[in-house]
Image (spheres, grey):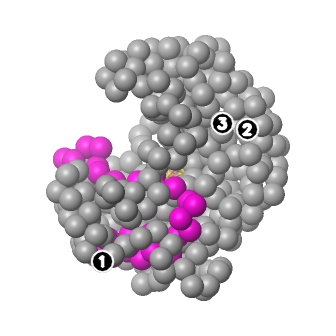
C-alpha cells in the first residue's frame, strides 16, 4: 500500500471514486472581492493573505462570457499536460459567494455549461453564506457536482482574531450546521491552518473532532506562512513571533489525521509557497519535496492512521 492510502483518505482517491476519471481543477476568476478587502470588515485583507489587487475582469464584459473564455482558454493546456479527462471549475481566489444570487447564478451556470466541466468548486468564507446563496448551491448540486471550499482556518477564537479574519469559530460552526441541513447535496471541504503562535496544543485534535460531527466531506490543511506583502510580514519584522518547525507542524498533522473520521478526504497535508522568494517564514515552506518526504517519514514512523485515535464523539472544547 502506498504512503497516502496507508495513512489517510487522499483527495485523488475521492476524485476517482466520484468521477471515475482523471479530474483536474481549472481556476476561474469570479470578479468578486472579500468583506475584509472592500471595507465592510476591513480594507487590507486577512493578516496572512497575499492576494493583491482585485480580479481583473469585473465589469469589463458579460460576466458569463468571461467565465466561458477563461475555461475555454485553460482546458487544452491542462488536457495536454496532465492527460486530464474531466474538469472542475474552481472559483478559488477571494470570496466567491460574496454577491447577489443573480450574479452568482450567472457565473456558476456559465461554468457548468462548458463542455468538459463536471462540476464547481467554490471558495468562500463562513460569514458569506446567506440562505439564498446556500439554496442556490443546493439547487445546482442536485444537478451537478458542487464542492464548497470553506475557509474556516481555525476553530480557536484567539487565532481567528490574530489572523484578523473578522469572524469567530461559532460563525463557522453555524455555517457548517446550516450547510448540512439546508444543502445536503453540496460537498463541503474545510480549509484549516495550523501553526499560529496563538494556537492551543489541542488545536488539531479539536478541529478534527468538530469536523467529524458536522458532516463535511473533506479537509485541506496548511501551515501558517509569513508572506511578503501581508500584515503578518509587517508584524514579523516589527516583533518576530514563533513559526512552526516542520517537526512541530507534522506532529499537528498526525494529531489531526489520527482523530479525523476515515470518511473525510484530505485534500492536502501542507502547503508550498507559490513564490518561494516571498516566503519569510517558516523557511521549510519554500520547498516542496524535502518537507513532503520528512512528513511522510514521521507519519509512517508514528503509525499514523486516519481515525485510529477517535475514542469519543464531539469536540472537547471550542475555546
Ligand atoms: S484570506 Fe480569503 S477572505 Fe481573507 S482576504 Fe484573503 S481571499 Fe479574502
246 to the left or right of 196: left
145 to the left or right of 78: right
Could you say whether the residue bearing mark 1 is in a helix, strand or loop?
helix
Q: Which residues are magenta?
A: 248-277
Residue at 70%, 32% (x, y): give it: 144
Marks 2 & 3, CB-CB < 8 Å contact:
yes
Residue 135 percent across, percent down from the top left: 81, 43
Marks 2 & 1, CB-CB < 8 Å contact:
no
Could you say whether the residue bearing mark 2 is in a helix, strand or loop?
helix
Where's the N terminus, which quadrant?
bottom left
Q: CA distance from mark 2 to mark 3?
A: 5 Å
241 to the left or right of 155: left
Q: CA distance from mark 2 to mark 1?
A: 39 Å
Give neighbour class at mark 3: few <14, some 14-19, many 20+ (Cα, 10 Å): many
Q: Which residue is mark 3?
A: 145
Q: Which residue is mark 1?
A: 302
In the rendered image, the vertical position of residue 123 relative to residue 194, given as above or below:
above
Residue at 73%, 38% (x, y): give it: 141
Query: Is residue 298 rendered magenta in the image?
Result: no
Residue 56 percent across, percent down from the top left: 49, 25
Q: Is mark 2 within 8 Å of ligand 1?
A: no
Residue at 44%, 53% (x, y): give it: 10
Q: Earlier in the sequence, mark 3 or mark 1?
A: 3
Could you say whether the residue bearing mark 3 is in a helix, strand or loop?
strand
Front in this rendered view, residue 73 or 101: 73
Amino acid at each position: 500500500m502506498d504512503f497516502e492510502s496507508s495513512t489517510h483518505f487522499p483527495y485523488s482517491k475521492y476524485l476517482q471514486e466520484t468521477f471515475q476519471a482523471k479530474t483536474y481543477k481549472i481556476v476561474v476568476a469570479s470578479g468578486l472581492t472579500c468583506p475584509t478587502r472592500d471595507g465592510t470588515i476591513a480594507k487590507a485583507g486577512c493578516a496572512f493573505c497575499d492576494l493583491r489587487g482585485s480580479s481583473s475582469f469585473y465589469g469589463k464584459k458579460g460576466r458569463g462570457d468571461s467565465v466561458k473564455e477563461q475555461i475555454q482558454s485553460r482546458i487544452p493546456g491542462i488536457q495536454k499536460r496532465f492527460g486530464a479527462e474531466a474538469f472542475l471549475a474552481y472559483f478559488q481566489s477571494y470570496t466567491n459567494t460574496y454577491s447577489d444570487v443573480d450574479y452568482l447564478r450567472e457565473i456558476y451556470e456559465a461554468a457548468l455549461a462548458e463542455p468538459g466541466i463536471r462540476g464547481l468548486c467554490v471558495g468562500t468564507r463562513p460569514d458569506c453564506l446567506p440562505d439564498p446563496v446556500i439554496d442556490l448551491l443546493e439547487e445546482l448540486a442536485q444537478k451537478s457536482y458542487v464542492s464548497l471550499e470553506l475557509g474556516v482556518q481555525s476553530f480557536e477564537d484567539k487565532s481567528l482574531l490574530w489572523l484578523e479574519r473578522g469572524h469567530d469559530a461559532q460563525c463557522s460552526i453555524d455555517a457548517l450546521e446550516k450547510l448540512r441541513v439546508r444543502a445536503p447535496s453540496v460537498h463541503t471541504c474545510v480549509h484549516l491552518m495550523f501553526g499560529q503562535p496563538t494556537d492551543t496544543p489541542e488545536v488539531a485534535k479539536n478541529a478534527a473532532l468538530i469536523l467529524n460531527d458536522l458532516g463535511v466531506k473533506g479537509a485541506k490543511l496548511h501551515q501558517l506562512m509569513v508572506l511578503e506583502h501581508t500584515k503578518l510580514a509587517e508584524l514579523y519584522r516589527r516583533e518576530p513571533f514563533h513559526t512552526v518547525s516542520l517537526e512541530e507542524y507534522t506532529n499537528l498533522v498526525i494529531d489531526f489525521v489520527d482523530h479525523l473520521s476515515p470518511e473525510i478526504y484530505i485534500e492536502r497535508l501542507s502547503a508550498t509557497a507559490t513564490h518561494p522568494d516571498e516566503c519569510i517564514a517558516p523557511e521549510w515552506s519554500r520547498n516542496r519535496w524535502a518537507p513532503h518526504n520528512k512528513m511522510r517519514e514521521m507519519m509512517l514512523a508514528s503509525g499514523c492512521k486516519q481515525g485510529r485515535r477517535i475514542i469519543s464523539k464531539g469536540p472537547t472544547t471550542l475555546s
